[in-house]
């Protein structure tokens, strides 16, 4: 019942620049003071932003937010903000294999606040969005003190006898005890009766200006069609009407070497033709589906910067409305570099009023096609994520089957929604406009399977020529036809109005942001008339 009168020092006493976050002592210390204060990188990555990037080969530090990207280099006061040069007062430094980052750029990107005590050197780091409960000691008047103890018990030792009116930060509350921190960094427990609560404040989070998706696209559904452009230029005047389509994504840009140079097949006539019809152009940037090239091209800030700079120059030159990223055939180990590339592209795309979207495969264990995609980490930096919900049975599949059965498609979309927590208003359903004609032949007692992908018009002509009557395959939700010719059996799960209507219904049921069709040239009038019903 008798309070412990003995005192002891906190275990950090004697440390030159201890750092505290919400009253907790960090494992690393700061260095410098005032304007020259520097925070160790491990603390920043653990407590401020786990996505702060450090590239050992070039001693580069990359800070990103939705509106900014900042590049710093060890020992240099020359930096880049949104790829424009800026001058720092103090350079990042490495001491005993720990990188220290100056405070000024951290405040600029992350809007954090810091209190540094002049007597103890303690640094109290407060992050944007943190709620701070301020308080003061209420010990009964001038000359009175309240005990700040090492634990929530009167039997614990005293860290400090705190004078009446002393400023406090409260980090935990209880019925009888509060965990509080003095400005000098000392953190302990004080009886509630000795504390007068003050204002509850929030470290300000600056408002990010609305982008095009939040203004021009708010409340609208995306109805996109990819335009596959190979070596030959696509003449837009041969396309005809595309009812319902409000975005075209031509495959114009490709990373062509290890340094991140980008080749363009863009066509101003195509852009003008689309814009004249009220259709936006979100041109596609691919990695050439080359895993080794992707490793090198995304491995450093300089290479990623080259990709981004050239892509943005093309976007400006051709008056584009958006950029669609399609990286496929990527080593799983390069997944973090893909995510970092998107983080670095995001603020610059927004600065240029470009909608940023990315194509992802359904989730699977495929090393080159799915596992590298961290869909949950990618989503915050994207305006839209297109799930290419097709190739359930792919070109070289060992067995014949649907390109995308309806149950498989819904499962693929739900996994991204539920497991990766990608918001429905960012998610777009990828729809195939092609069908595979499967051929099964018996050779040496075994069935050999092959396939050929064709568009909707080709299938319609085949059905008419051979006078075939499809039947509904309830397992896939698609029309199906099978026929024999000579020594082969042909099987076709058909993409037609029936399956397209079912995909539209699925997009509505899941309240998705839109649909995207691969590809424009494989569709026909029936496709566009059907897909125009999605609004």
Image (cartoon, rainbow, N blue to C red):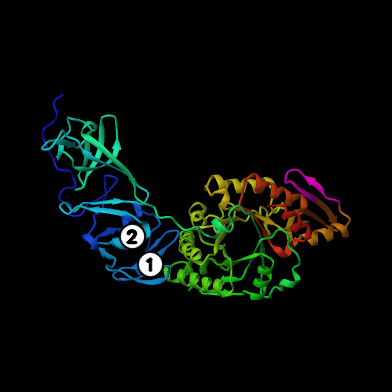
- Residue 484 in the figure: left or right of residue 70: right
Left or right relative to 144: residue 107? right
Give the image quarter of residue 248.
bottom right
Q: Residues within 10 Å of mark 2 (few under 14, many from 20)?
A: some
Magenta-colored span: 469-480
Residue 462 seen in the current view: yes
Residue under numbered circle 2: 106
Residue at (67% x, 64% y) in the render = 278
- Determine the image quadrant of residue 386: bottom right
Residue 523 in the image: x percent, y percent? Answer: 74, 61
| Magenta stretch holds residue 514 | no
- The quarter in which the N terminus is drawn is top left
**Circle 2 — which element?**
helix
Q: Residue at x 34, y 51 (%)?
A: 127
Disc 1, SS: strand
Q: Nearer the viewer, residue 492 or 519?
A: 519
Q: What residue did someone put label 1 on?
A: 71
- Indicate the position of residue 13 as horizontal and vertical percent values: 16, 48
């Amino acid at each position: 019942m008798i309070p412990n009168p003995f005192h002891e020092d906190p275990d950090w006493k004697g440390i030159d620049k201890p750092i505290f976050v919400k009253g907790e002592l960090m494992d690393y210390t700061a260095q410098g003071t005032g304007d020259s204060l520097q925070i160790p990188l491990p603390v920043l990555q653990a407590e401020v932003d786990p996505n702060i990037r450090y590239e050992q080969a070039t001693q580069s530090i990359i800070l990103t937010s939705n509106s900014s990207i900042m590049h710093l280099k060890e020992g240099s006061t020359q930096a880049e903000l949104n790829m424009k040069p800026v001058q720092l007062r103090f350079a990042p430094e490495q001491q005993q294999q720990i990188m220290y980052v100056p405070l000024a750029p951290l405040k600029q990107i992350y809007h954090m606040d810091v209190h540094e005590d002049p007597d103890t050197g303690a640094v109290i780091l407060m992050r944007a969005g943190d709620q701070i409960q301020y308080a003061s000691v209420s010990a009964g008047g001038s000359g009175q003190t309240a005990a700040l103890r090492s634990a929530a018990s009167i039997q614990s030792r005293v860290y400090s006898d705190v004078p009446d009116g002393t400023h406090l930060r409260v980090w935990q509350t209880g019925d009888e005890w509060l965990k509080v921190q003095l400005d000098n960094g000392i953190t302990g427990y004080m009886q509630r009766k000795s504390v007068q609560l003050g204002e509850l404040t929030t470290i300000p989070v600056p408002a990010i200006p609305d982008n095009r998706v939040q203004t021009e696209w708010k409340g609208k559904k995306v109805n996109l069609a990819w335009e596959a452009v190979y070596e030959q230029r696509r003449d837009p005047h041969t396309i005809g009407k595309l009812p319902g389509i409000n975005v075209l994504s031509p495959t114009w840009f490709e990373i062509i070497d290890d340094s991140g140079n980008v080749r363009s097949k863009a066509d101003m006539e195509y852009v003008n033709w689309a814009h004249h019809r009220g259709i936006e152009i979100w041109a596609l940037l691919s990695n050439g589906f080359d895993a080794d090239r992707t490793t090198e091209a995304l491995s450093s800030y300089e290479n990623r910067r080259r990709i981004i700079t050239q892509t943005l120059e093309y976007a400006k030159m051709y008056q584009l409305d958006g950029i669609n990223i399609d990286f496929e055939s990527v080593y799983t180990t390069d997944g973090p570099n893909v995510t970092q590339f998107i983080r670095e592209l995001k603020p610059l795309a927004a600065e240029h009023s470009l909608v940023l979207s990315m194509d992802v495969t359904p989730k699977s264990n495929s090393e080159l096609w799915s596992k590298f995609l961290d869909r949950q980490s990618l989503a915050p930096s994207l305006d839209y994520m297109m799930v290419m919900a097709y190739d359930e049975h792919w070109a070289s599949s060992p067995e014949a089957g649907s390109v995308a059965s309806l149950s498989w498609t819904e499962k693929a979309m739900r996994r991204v929604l539920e497991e990766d927590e990608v918001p429905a208003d960012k998610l777009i359903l990828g729809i195939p406009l092609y069908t595979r004609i499967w051929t099964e032949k018996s050779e040496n007692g075994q069935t050999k399977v092959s396939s050929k992908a064709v568009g909707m018009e080709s299938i319609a002509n085949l059905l008419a020529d051979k006078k075939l009557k499809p039947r509904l395959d309830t397992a896939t939700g698609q029309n199906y036809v099978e026929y024999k010719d000579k020594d082969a059996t042909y099987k076709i799960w058909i993409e037609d109005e029936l399956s397209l209507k079912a995909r539209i219904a699925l997009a509505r049921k899941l309240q998705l942001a839109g649909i995207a069709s691969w590809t424009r040239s494989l569709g026909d009038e029936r496709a566009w008339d059907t897909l125009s019903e999605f609004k």
